[in-house]
Amino acid sequence: MLNICISGATGWTGSELVRGVLTAPDMTLTSAVARRAAGQDIGTAIGDEKAGLIVVPTLEQALEYSCDVLIEYTHPDYGMANTLFAVERGIPVVLGTTGLTAADINIIDHAARDAGVGVVTGNFALCAALAQHFSLFAAKHIEQFEIIDYAASTKPDAPSGTAGELAELLGDVRKPKLDLPIDETIGPQEIRGANINGVQVHSVRLPAYTLSVESIFAQQGERLVIRHEAGSSAVPYVFGTLMAARRIGKITGVVRGLDKLLFC
């Protein structure tokens, strides 16, 4: 049995992960972290029946209990610190928190390798992982592409973690060709989006969006659009997160993207 700690256990995704772990035949939820729900039974805190596990306010308290894997879904302000806290104690991390930069991930990777444990990051929805995989394949064959990132008007991070990570990975495949350099744009250069690892990314923040990311590839006379649309439920993230938790024991350092586990 895998002993699991969930940080951000009463959040939008965390609540569904709690349900997933509680019903998984090969996992035990040994601790749950949520500051506002501290002292409550985790089942009650997420609107279900009592589960017999009391929520604690800090990760330090949570890791006093047995933990084989930390599942981290909090806020960018806490995600990196929580991940490093666990890694330094030899605990692998499934990192679903968004908003971390490439530099942050690099620091986590070095810490994880020093500790000999794994960290898996990215969007853990299966369709999102496939969209990333197909986009990376397309970038090997098409030299011009950009990303559009859609999310709710209140989402604090822009681009989303999904779009930012996709841009960084695409830029590692190749730097897309620009027929007109950005600095030759007539008008505000910001109109052309932000450059992430050589890839132009455009973020739209409006009501009625949950999270959507599309990568657009184009060459003379044709276009390919690969788009992932997230719905209003966090259920799709459970499958990939728990799959990563099951496989993370064989990993050292950071693996970016669920697709790496799907096709390994």
Image (cartoon, grey):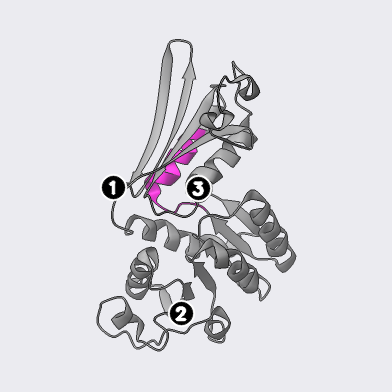
Main secondary structure of the magenta stretch: helix
Q: Nearer the viewer, residue 22 or 54?
A: 54
Q: Is residue 127 magenta?
A: yes
In x, y percent, where is residue 27?
42, 74
Question: Which percent across, then down, holds residue 55?
Answer: 42, 84
On the image, numbered disc 2 is attached to which residue? 35
Q: CB of mark 3 within 8 Å of CB of mark 2?
A: no
Q: Earlier in the sequence, mark 2 or mark 1?
A: 2
**What kind of residue is marked 2?**
Arg
**Which residue is label 1 attached to?**
208
Magenta region, residue range: 122-135
Left or right: residue 220 compared with residue 172: left
Query: Where residue 115 sits: x, y (%)?
Result: 71, 68
Does 87 sit above or below residue 136? below
Q: CA distance from mark 3 to mark 2?
A: 25 Å
| Label 3 SS | loop
- Secondary structure of the residue carrying tag 2 is loop
- Circle 2: is it few (<14), some (14-19), or many (20+) Cα within 10 Å? some
Amino acid type assigned to the residue bearing label 3 in the image: Ala
Task: Determine whether, in the image, residue 228 is placed left or right of residue 82.
Answer: left
Query: Going 60% across and 67% down the picture, which residue do you hit?
Result: 83
Q: Quick one: label 1, few (<14), some, or many (20+) residues within 10 Å?
A: few
> Quick one: 81 or 173, which is closer to the camera?
81
The image shows a total of numbered marks equal to: 3
Q: Provide the secondary structure element on which disc 1 rests.
A: loop
User: Which one is nearer the viewer's eye here, 195 or 261?
Assistant: 195
Residue 7 visible in this rendered orientation of the protein:
yes
Please name the residue that numbered disc 3 is placed on.
158
Identity of the residue furthest to the front in this view: 187
